Image: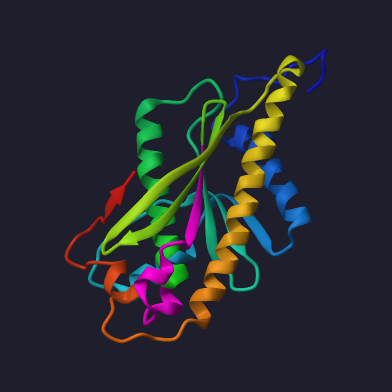
Amino acid sequence: MTDKGPLNRFIGERKYTVDRIVPLFKAIQSVYREYSFDWIEVQASCIKDIKELFPEIDFTLNKVDGIGSKVSNNKEIIFIEVSGGPENAVLKHVKEDTEKLIKEAMFGLISLLRGYLGKGAEKARNICVYMVQCIGDRITLSEVCLDKKHFYKISQIKSAMLPFSFDEVEKFMEVFELLYALIDGLKNQTRELKKLMLADPISNVPTIRDWIWDAKITFLTLIY
């Protein structure tokens, strides 16, 4: 992008993902080596974990546009969906991707907490996984956490517009702020997981196992 050549807005979802979205997260990966990203039709391992934990639940989920994982434990903690190109987002596709992204993040959180099922549930409330959705030229960062028994809370953290011409280059400041918010959230996730790991088991209180899933329902209640 230069003052003589604005970027093409009339491109498809795949090219938009590879040319504009992937480089943002490659920059994170190059600095913070503890995180890695995979792209384009990625099979989420957390889905396999859910099927192992709850074999009685029958569900299918399409592959993911992008996934960020913690290298040390290979847990998927960032889920990315690109809902069309910059100029051709379709409302039906956006709605489907939004629901799909929520499920991906929720299952990712369940997989992340799988090793702590006997710990007190209250101690897991500040542990989040992260969602990034691109709709048109807007990129939005949100987080999902376990709020109370069978309730998952979704909070929007930051939204930014991607620039396509040199005249809009200052919009990159908001994009960088969004990426910084993601890194800050990941650091907090590491701290909270360490607290959870060191916490002593407590009797007569709800555990993460009690809160995390109700096998009698196919989709958990969410708080926006």
Q: Nearer the viewer, residue 223 or 101?
A: 223
Rendered image quadrant of residue 217: bottom left
- Furthest toward the left, the residue is 216
Q: How is the image coloured?
A: rainbow
Q: Is residue 39 visible?
A: yes
Q: Position of residue 146 (x, y in %)?
A: 37, 61
At 17% from the left and 65% from the top, the residue drawn is 216
Say if the magenta span includes residue 140.
no
Q: How many marks?
A: 0
- Is 79 placed above or below 127 here? above
Residue 133 image point, x, y percent: 50, 39
The answer to if 130 sits in the magenta stretch is yes
Task: Give the side of residue 171 with respect to residue 116, left or right.
Answer: right
| Residue 18 is at least partly visible in this image | no
Q: Quadrant of residue 32?
A: bottom right
Q: Residue at x 49, y 22 (%)?
A: 88
- The stretch of residues the image draws in magenta is 114-133
Q: Quadrant of the N terminus?
A: top right
- Residue in the foreground of this view, choosing between 9 and 110: 110
On-image quarter of the C terminus? top left
Does residue 153 lie above or below 113 as drawn? Answer: above
Residue at 60% in and 19% down: 10
**Residue 144 x/y as whole percent:** 43, 53
**Residue visible at 46% across and 26% down in the picture:** 89
Quadrant in which residue 72 is drawn: bottom right
Front residue of 103 and 207: 207
Using the image, determine if residue 35 lies above or below residue 81. below
